[in-house]
Image (cartoon, coloured by chain):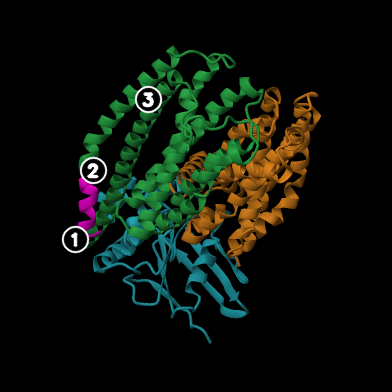
Amino acid sequence: MPLSELANPHRFLRRARVLIPALAVFALVLIGVGLVQGFRAPADYQQGEMVRVMYIHVPSAWIALAAYTLMAIASLGTLVWRHPLADVAAKAAAPIGAAFCLLCLVTGALWGRPMWGAYWVWDPRLTSVLVLFLLYLGVIALWRAIDDPSRAAKAAAILTLVGFINVPIVKFSVEWWSSLHQGASVFRLDGPSIHPSLLQPLLISAAGFAALFFALHLAAMRNEILRRRLHTLGILAAAEAEAR
Amino acid sequence: MSAALAAILKRDLKLALRAGGGAGIGMIFFLAVVVIVPFAVGPDLPLLKRIGAAVLWIGALLASLLGLERIFAADHEDGSLDLLFLAPLPLALTAAAKAFAHWIATGLPLVVMAPILGLMLGIDARSLAAVTATLLVGTPAVTFIGLLAGALAVTLPRSGLLVAVLVLPLAIPLLIFGVAATDAAVTGEIPLGAPFRLLCAISLFFFVLGPIAAAAALRYARE
Amino acid sequence: MRLLAEGLGSMRGGRTLFQGLSFALHAGESLVVAGPNGSGKTTLLRLIAGLLPPTAGRITLADSEDPVGESVHFVGHLDALKGALTLGENLAFYRSLFGGGGDTVDAALGRMGMGTLAMLPAEVLSAGQRRRAALARLLVSHRPIWLLDEPANALDADGQILVARLMQEHRGRGGIVIAATHTRLDLPGAREISLAGAA
């Protein structure tokens, strides 16, 4: 492992030591504020108190999609620009993105039960998010299946990029096909259709979720870098013992 | 002897759960099977509920069998299979210990996932417990009879799906009674009645037959 | 303890590797199986261990009905190490599997000159280190008969001296050593069987 390659991760580790706790605190504060405001906001006249799941369900959906997009960009970084930390970023993002995706699916199921009478329906929006979850799991499995990190990085990058087609499908599934799921209320060309008293806590909560994701992501990247270092140290230790 | 068995169980569990061990892939496959069925038959919830038990069983069966090819092959490749032959244990018991470890790492997670997947297929909550029970009894039997596939795969390089296909006919009685037991639970009759007890009997039979058959196959593979 | 071979013969792929091989080994004795590559040395060792059935003849322990395999340590070409486990875990497994009360893992590794490497995953070890790890198996569990296939392979000069010493000590304890080699092996007083090689 040439020394130049260590320089980048080294700088990263130094910055991470400051950024991770800062982002974690930020996340806690924002999510806290968002949820408190969300509980103080008026309940929905149809759904009652259940609508408050929205403050967790919607941001986790956004993060799940954003995380996959980040993975896709990192994959381009691996394949096209050959950035040394790109594959670490991609590998670290996968389990976290999958977790947010799962959170979205579970909170959605809990919300759907009182609203539609079923925990799960096979409608386009839900199914495409489930497919997104499967894609996440596939990428994670691929990373674990290949021993050599650089080969694993390239394979996972290709799989991620091909799977990216699912992200716009998730976003537009509600418009392209008839779906039980509610249409877009925030990211619309005409602007948000949701009332500001509900929009504000939602956006604050979402910002908190984003900070949480980045805190977790940076921590995961740090773990991966340290793990690789440990592996290299093991090889060096064995080689040194052999040479004495 | 029990120390040796415990050692095999512990080692195989460690190997399965560490990176590259392949423990998670069975779960992903199970999920994938359940996801693609509604794409094929349409999102018709009553229909999905009717075939739900069958879909869960097919998914669990295939997920278990596909992982079993490597159970002896990896040991054969690095020379540790030879040493298992020399251990002071009957080979059938060694095979059984490996199968049990494999089930804990691959089969048991499938059982844990089954209620959630069953929910997605429209099986109602009160039947889910019974469905899970049939899989809890049936998946170890799949693993144990699939041991034979693993033993056959040692001598066939790059056997791929061949051995899984060879063992599939043997797993059919398990499938029949497994689905019958699960169906009985879903359609609301006595949840764990006669079909379930028959499933237990067949499972016990496979717990014994599987390791013995696998040990015989491993011995005959030595030329 | 006596190891008896009567009229052993083996055929592989239609070719007769050897036939009519007989010997009797008492405690403390050793046997070198010499011959060029492909002459059937590994086959003979596997036959004695019970890993292969002989085409003719049989191998038994005098005054014992037990299968020979349970009294045998077999160190073949492959190292039987799991890369994902640490060196220590690999040996601890074999210690528990074979039983028989041998050295502790740390003592065995120390003896083999690898005391500091116990925590490393086996996949980072060099070929020579893997060979030593395979030989460490002989120390963590006591069995009377050692079957060693090219034991000095991949070892440096120090390693070869170590192997010779291990074999000597084992014989001193009343054990039997059977070693296959295509080069010279330091095993004083050993009998020799020479396999002719492919026709």
Real-space CA distance between mark 2 and mark 3, rounded to the nearest whole angstrom: 29 Å
- Residue beneath label 1, please? A244
Residue B129 lies, in percent from the top left, at: 67, 26
Q: Which circle, 3 or 1, is nearer the viewer?
A: 3
Report the side of C71 relative to B115 (left or right): left
Looking at the rendered structure, the kind of residue marked 3 is Ile
* In the rendered image, the vertical position of residue C198 relative to residue A8, given as above or below: below
- Residue beneath label 2, please? A13
Looking at the rendered structure, the kind of residue marked 2 is Leu
Q: Chain B is drawn in which colour?
A: orange
> Can residue A134 be seen from the camera position used here?
no
* In the rendered image, the vertical position of residue C131 relative to residue A207, given as above or below: below
Magenta stretch: give its range: A1-12
Which chain is disc 2 placed on? A
- Residue beneath label 3, please? A204
| Quadrant housing the C terminus of chain A | bottom left
Report the side of A120 relative to A143 (left or right): right
Closest to the observer, A164 or C11 = A164
Q: Do the residues labelled 2 and 3 touch (CB within 8 Å)?
A: no
